[in-house]
Image (cartoon, rainbow, N blue to C red):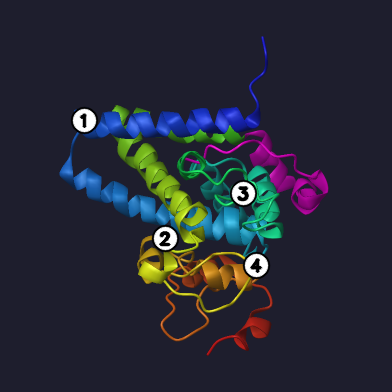
């Protein structure tokens, strides 16, 4: 029997979260838990995307404050169910290298640039690209990153099992599937809509005239803390903060400072106006 690729497993995991979320809304509706799930989704994004997969592993913008913080950071990067920190960072680093050009793993502008391609990428269904393992050698050499990568599905299964034992299917739906759906929606926005070459003229703005089509949107900065200023990030990807100009909003930096020590903070201060 052919062994499933890591990419296929992540897509199955994503589909499982989507189906579980929809089933929860249909058969286990609870207004209070719905809003709790939304809040947890916001926190999943803050700690799992901004504070783990993205700023911690992919760009190494900060160092964990201590070992307990490091375990928590990597745990949150795992339960958001978008692939291990190592796998996600490998793809993301390639994305920055070729942003909106040929070679970008999830550009909506390359290939045939069709609406169907954009739709598939919106649901995080893009082809597996060959990644040079040297691009994440710093992560594969780190014992903690290696452990969470090796035990990725076990950690998620353990989290889901604990939820099920505590509150059954309803708990799994509102405390895993719904937050994961929230996170995936945010990633879809960042991957597709925040790279739309004309949308920024309607809802957003660009602070930096760089080669890709990224833009900032204040609403996204509130919904997806630390990540709404996408043009800022692509201009200065090594910065832990996400706000540099008047009017920019960054609701993620406080969390990064809580769990870690920011790198090169003095250097990026000169870009703040």
CA distance for labels 1 and 4: 41 Å
How packed mark 4 is, by other alpha carbons closer than 10 Å (few <14, some 14-19, many 20 or more), is many
Residue 69 pos. (x, y %): 58, 58
CA distance for labels 3 and 1: 38 Å
Residue for point 35% across, 67% down: 219
CA distance for labels 4 and 2: 18 Å
Q: Which of 141 and 59 is in front in this view?
A: 59
CA distance for labels 2 and 3: 26 Å
Residue 78 pos. (x, y %): 55, 43
Q: Nearer the viewer, residue 19 or 102?
A: 102
Q: Residue 110 carries which label?
A: 3
The image quadrant where one finds the N terminus is top right
Residue for point 68% across, 34% down: 150
179 over 230 or under it: above or below: above
Q: Which is closer to the viewer, label 4 or label 2?
A: 2
**What segment carries the magenta color?**
123-151
SS under mark 1: helix
Mark with earlier residue (3, 1): 1
């Amino acid at each position: 029997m052919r062994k499933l690729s890591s990419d296929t497993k992540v897509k199955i995991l994503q589909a499982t979260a989507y189906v579980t979320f929809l089933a929860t809304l249909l058969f286990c509706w609870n207004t209070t838990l719905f809003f709790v799930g939304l809040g947890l989704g916001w926190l999943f994004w803050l700690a799992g995307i901004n504070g783990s997969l993205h700023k911690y592993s992919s760009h190494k913008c900060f160092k964990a404050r201590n070992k307990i913080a490091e375990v928590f950071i990597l745990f949150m990067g795992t339960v958001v169910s978008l692939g291990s920190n190592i796998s996600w960072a490998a793809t993301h680093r390639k994305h920055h290298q070729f942003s909106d050009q040929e070679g970008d793993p999830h550009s909506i502008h390359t290939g045939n640039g069709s609406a169907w391609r954009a739709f598939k990428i919106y649901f995080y269904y893009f082809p597996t690209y060959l990644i040079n393992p040297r691009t994440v050698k710093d992560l594969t050499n780190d014992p903690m990153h290696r452990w969470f990568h090796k035990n990725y599905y076990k950690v998620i299964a353990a989290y889901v099992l604990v939820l099920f034992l505590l509150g059954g299917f309803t708990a799994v739906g509102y405390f895993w599937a719904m937050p994961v759906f929230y996170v995936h929606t945010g990633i879809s926005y960042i991957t597709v809509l925040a790279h739309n070459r004309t949308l920024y003229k309607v809802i957003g703005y660009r602070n930096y005239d760089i080669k890709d089509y990224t833009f900032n949107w204040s609403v996204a900065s509130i919904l997806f803390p630390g990540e709404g200023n996408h043009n800022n990030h692509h201009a200065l990807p090594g910065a832990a903060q996400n706000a540099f100009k008047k009017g920019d909003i960054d609701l993620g930096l406080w969390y990064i400072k809580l769990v870690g020590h920011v790198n090169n903070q003095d250097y990026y201060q000169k870009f703040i106006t």
